[in-house]
Image: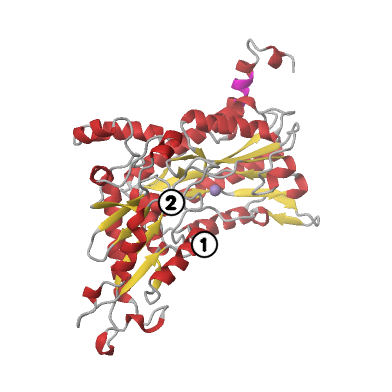
Amino acid sequence: MHLISRHRFVLGLSLGLVVLNSTFGAELPSLMEQPRADFATRRRELAKLVKDAEAKRPNLGGMRGAATKAEGGEPRASEPIVVLIGDAGNEEGKFRQENNFAYLTGVDVPGSALILFPDGTETLYLPPRDPMSERWNGKTIGPDTETAELVGFSKVESTEAFLADLFRAASDPRKRTRRSKLTSFYMVAPEGRMGGTPKESDFLKFVKLGAPNTPVRDVSTLIHELRTIKTEGEVALLRKAIAMTGDAQTDVMKIIKPGIAEYVLEGTILGAFMRGGSDRPGFPSIVGSGPNSCIMHYMANRRMIEDGELVVVDIGAEYMNYTADITRTYPSSGKFSPRQREIYQLVLDAQSGAAAQFKLGETSQPILNRWVHDFFKASSLRAKDLEGVEQTMDHFFAHGLGHSLGMDVHDVGDSRRPLKPGEVFTIEPGIYIQSESLGVRIEDDYVVNKDGTLEKISKGIVSEVDEIERAIAESKTSRSIGTKAASNP
Ligand SMILES: [Mn+2]
């Protein structure tokens, strides 16, 4: 459970659920700083999406053959049972709930599971409480009626009942009537590109044993469709993660100088995240100086930073499973060289130019990507590739312009579609000239607001050339006050 969220949760509940409050004391579960109703809404919407998908299935033979042929030989939609298993946790790290499960439940108890039954019953399965385990790991919530009310589920059962309930639902004899509809399982596909893990693979083996004739279909794309559009509560969490990341970038500007190691900056970044209340970085921090500035996903961070280099700092704090993703590029000396400045300014102009292209209902991420390519190509600047051939700048833009952002740093959803209100995504143009050991990437996080306007959430984190030079210069002045180390470099 998140300490911070627990605290907020107590405040949030104190109006309506005073009795529960006193029962649970300070041990209320986190619902990730979001209204409980939001999670219930998501489950309802998912159940509807699943039903629609099932009804639309063209050939009801499905993945598992004839199981969905109803009596009389007429194909019929089966009744979908949605089943999700949360992360089991382990002793090695801080617990982090699996994203799809967290999104639908807000419950971060290890070893939980969820079934949405065809009759509309939503059951959350929690491990039975174990005094010995709680002695080591702290109090938790268990399967009881108080918990059900607390987490907004119609039923909370022990995980001991989970498999039996699942298989009973799949083979309910009451469904074998004239109008019978067979059942199907909707679960996260094993080892899928997004979200699937080996645990689903193991689980699927059990499912095949217990209900061999029940077709299994992938539910993840339907959950992802919901996750693509963020609620206000989710955007608020992203704003917090972004603010923490901004503090880390500010701290980097305070200490950056030639002669320190990339990992020193990383240490400062992680410290700032934790001080801000972040749970962990959303992805490994990238601190690439000089030649490493041209390696897009450099994360070894072992090199000593030299004078006159650029340092790409691509980082994101995670908060309540939501992650920021902000990149800044700094001159190690505090001043951009004329060449660094012209490349940097081009990248910055590409970013603001792309954002200015945004039109609700028309603009998709690939459209912005193409615009930036053309913009780079049109620049009068040139650089040499590794073969010594002079090239236009689009040649050095070596990755996509951005991605959706949310619980995953490269978040789920179909990025080819026009961006809708509630979508959060990055715009991160970059130029990487290996022949000059000169890499620049500037990345900010944007939300399409309800009114259809595009907002740069991270606008408070400085990125203009003079702003960055001023920030580094100011911190140098303050560093030199009262510290022997700084006055004697
Ligand atoms: Mn990114």
Q: Image point 31% across, 62% down: which residue? A: 165
Q: Image point 75% across, 34% down: which residue? A: 304
Q: Is residue 245 left or right of residue 178?
A: right
Q: State the residue position of label 2.
A: 99
Q: Quadrant of residue 147?
A: top left
Residue density around tag 2, few if under 14, some if 14–19, many if 20 or more, within 10 Å: many
Q: Quadrant of residue 67?
A: bottom left
Spot the residue most to the right: 388
Q: Position of residue 372 (x, y in %)?
A: 56, 54
Main secondary structure along the magenta-highlighted residues: helix
Q: Is residue 170 left or right of residue 289?
A: left
Q: Image point 71% across, 51% down: which residue? A: 382
In the rendered image, the vertical position of residue 447 relative to residue 186, given as above or below: above
The part of the chain drawn in magenta is 472-476
Q: In what element is the residue under mark 2? A: helix
Residue density around tag 1, few if under 14, some if 14–19, many if 20 or more, within 10 Å: few
Q: State the residue position of label 1.
A: 193
Q: Nearer the viewer, residue 439 or 133?
A: 133
Name which residue type carries label 2. Asn
Q: How many marks?
A: 2
Name which residue type carries label 1. Arg
Q: Position of residue 206 (x, y in %)?
A: 44, 66
In the rendered image, the vertical position of residue 295 relative to residue 470, given as above or below: below
Q: In what element is the residue under mark 1? A: loop
Q: Earlier in the sequence, mark 2 or mark 1?
A: 2
Point out the image quarter for the N terminus: top left
Spot the residue most to the bottom: 72
Q: Nearer the viewer, residue 451 or 105?
A: 105
Q: Quadrant of residue 186?
A: bottom left
